[in-house]
Amino acid sequence: MKQILLLVAALVLTNCTAHSVKLGKKCTVADSSGAYEKSYIWIVDKATNGSFDQKINKENCKKNS
């Protein structure tokens, strides 16, 4: 049952027309208080897809640790 649910969720997320799905651990840059966002699944607007990798990436996770 869990596998079916994951498959359906993956199909729904990949069929978005205005958004794309990025998978993998990525983080934002920590702010002045040290807070940052970390996730394994990112839903990105296709219009801003090019600048996404510059702002949110794996290297930021290493810097924030």
Image (cartoon, rainbow, N blue to C red):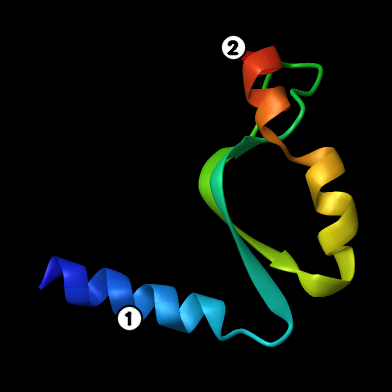
Q: Could you tell me the amino acid type at mark 1?
A: Val
Residue name at image x 86 percent, y 41 percent: 54
Q: Residues within 10 Å of mark 1 (few under 14, many from 20)?
A: few
Of the 4 image quadrants, the one containing the C terminus is top right
8 with respect to 13 (left or right): left
Q: Which residue is mark 1?
A: 8
**Where does residue 50 sit, x and y in percent of width and height?**
88, 58
Please state which of residues 30 and 32 is positioned toward the viewer in this rendering.
30
| Picture quadrant where residue 46 is located | bottom right
The secondary element bearing badge 1 is classed as helix
Looking at marks 2 and 1 on the same chain, the residue that comes earlier in the sequence is marked by 1
The secondary element bearing badge 2 is classed as loop
Q: Residues within 10 Å of mark 2 (few under 14, many from 20)?
A: few
**Where does residue 22 sit, x and y in percent of width and height?**
61, 57
Please state which of residues 32 and 26 is positioned toward the viewer in this rendering.
26
Tag on residue 30? none
* Vertical comparison of 65 with 46: above or below: above
Residue name at image x 53 percent, y 43 percent: 39
**Where does residue 27 sit, x and y in percent of width and height?**
65, 34
| Picture quadrant where residue 61 is located | top right
Determine the residue located farthest toward the left in the rendered image: 1
Residue name at image x 82 percent, y 62 percent: 49
Cα–Cα span, label 2 and label 1? 34 Å
**Where does residue 24 sit, x and y in percent of width and height?**
53, 45
Q: Could you tell me the amino acid type at mark 2?
A: Ser
* Vertical comparison of 21 with 37: above or below: below
Q: Are marks 2 and 1 in contact (CB under 8 Å)?
A: no
Nearer to us: label 2 or label 1: 1
Disc tally is 2
Residue name at image x 10 percent, y 73 percent: 1
Tag on residue 65? 2
